[in-house]
Amino acid sequence: MRNPVLRRHWSVEARVTGMATVVVAVLLAAGMAVFYALAPAGHFHDAPRDLTFLLLGFAVALAAVAWSVWHAVKRALRPVRTMTGELDTISDDRTFHQVTVPAGHDEVAELAGAVNRTLRRLERLNERQRAWVADASHELRSPLTGLRAKLELALEHPEDEDWPGAARSALVDADRLHRIISDLLVMAKLEAGVLGEQETIDLGELVRAETARRGGRVPIELETDEGVLVHGARSHLIRLLTNLLDNADRHARTWVRVAVGTDGRHALLMVADDGPGIPPEERERVFQRFQRLAEGRRCDAGGTGLGLPISRDIAIAHGGNLVVGDADGTGGARLVLRLPLA
């Protein structure tokens, strides 16, 4: 019988003709089993002394095993203690030095490699945040400096100043400040994962409604399919569409085209214009924060350089993406939004 449960056992010694009979009773789960064995009786007189030596030997062996295990664990954890000290240094001086990777290919070495990869990602994120803060400070400082200079100049000779003109000029700088701060708040919410209330939206209907209320510089040509449903925050999708239409309207010569359709698994929104277009080497740069191409500065000197970056962040927050597509032979820029179908 396998794996019997030993409840209790006992031995009985009975001397018979110079031999000792050992009776062992074992209580098993299935019942009682009794075993008999014969052994020279003299062996039982030496049992206490043998048991003492056995216990002493067992204690020594146990101590040796415990020491060996302790020493092995201490040696195995030495790289972990080294990494802990190095990580404490990183948290103190906010630098992202790499931790020491121990020799070998064990789990501790894998842990050190994972820690170094995480530190490299944190370092890149930290660099991007510092660059973003520097760019934001510069963009906010420019209109503030201009506004302050105009007001100081007007106050030097208030009797000769055209105050309605000065107010209009100050209002332009104030509007630019407002746009920058509003865009920064939107980006902060998107990075925090705050999208607001979400619903199922007919993308074609949304495009038709938003283009109908616009008074753009050039006409907008529409081509929208019915029943292209996506799930998302209406206010954010409207902002994304508005940014794309504003961008196209600034650069277009004679027309802007907007198309809505599907590719099987995704909803597609395409906004194109017949302007100068975006060079292939600049297609990713336009999605960097505060980065504006020379053509964009020429068309709109008061822009913030955040419209397309915010649009891509909105697309990514909705599980999609926004890219610059290849022109279809008519020149100009062509931006393509992909969103999962609802």
Image (cartoon, grey):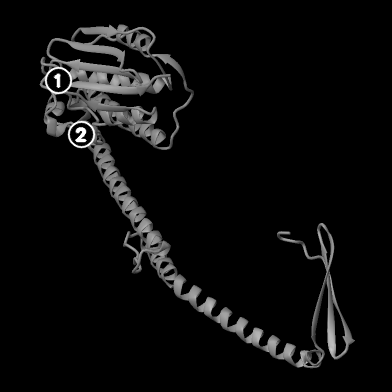
Asked whether 284 or 214 is in front, the reply is 284
Picture layout, residue 217 above or below residue 45: above
Label 2: which secondary element: loop
Q: Is residue 185 left or right of residue 61?
A: left
Question: Picture coordinates of residue 116 (x, y %)?
Answer: 34, 58
* Residue with the mark numbered 2: 284
Kindly identify the amino acid type of the residue bearing the numbered disc 2.
Answer: Glu
On the image, the x and y values in percent for residue 40 come to 79, 89
Residue 126 falls left or right of residue 34: left
Which image quadrant for residue 304?
A: top left
Disc on res. 327 = 1
Residue 249 rendering spot, x and y as whole percentages = 20, 16
Q: Quadrant of the C terminus?
A: top left
Image quadrant occupied by the N terminus: bottom right
Q: Which mark is residue 176?
A: none
Residue at the spot 32% in from the left edge and 62% down from the top edge: 98
**Measured along the vertical axis of the image, is residue 125 above or below residue 292?**
below
Q: Which residue shows up at 39% across the image and 27% down it?
A: 318
Rendered residue at 12%/18% (across/down): 275
Residue farthest front in this picture? 17
Q: Residues under labels 1 and 2: Cα distance? A: 16 Å
- 127 versus 231 height, above or below: below
Callout 1 environment at 10 Å: few (<14), some (14 to 19), or many (20+)? Answer: some
- The residue positioned 50% from the left and 73% from the top of the image is 73
Amino acid on which disc 1 is placed? Ala
Q: Does the rendering let one see residue 153? A: no
Q: Secondary structure at mark 1?
A: loop
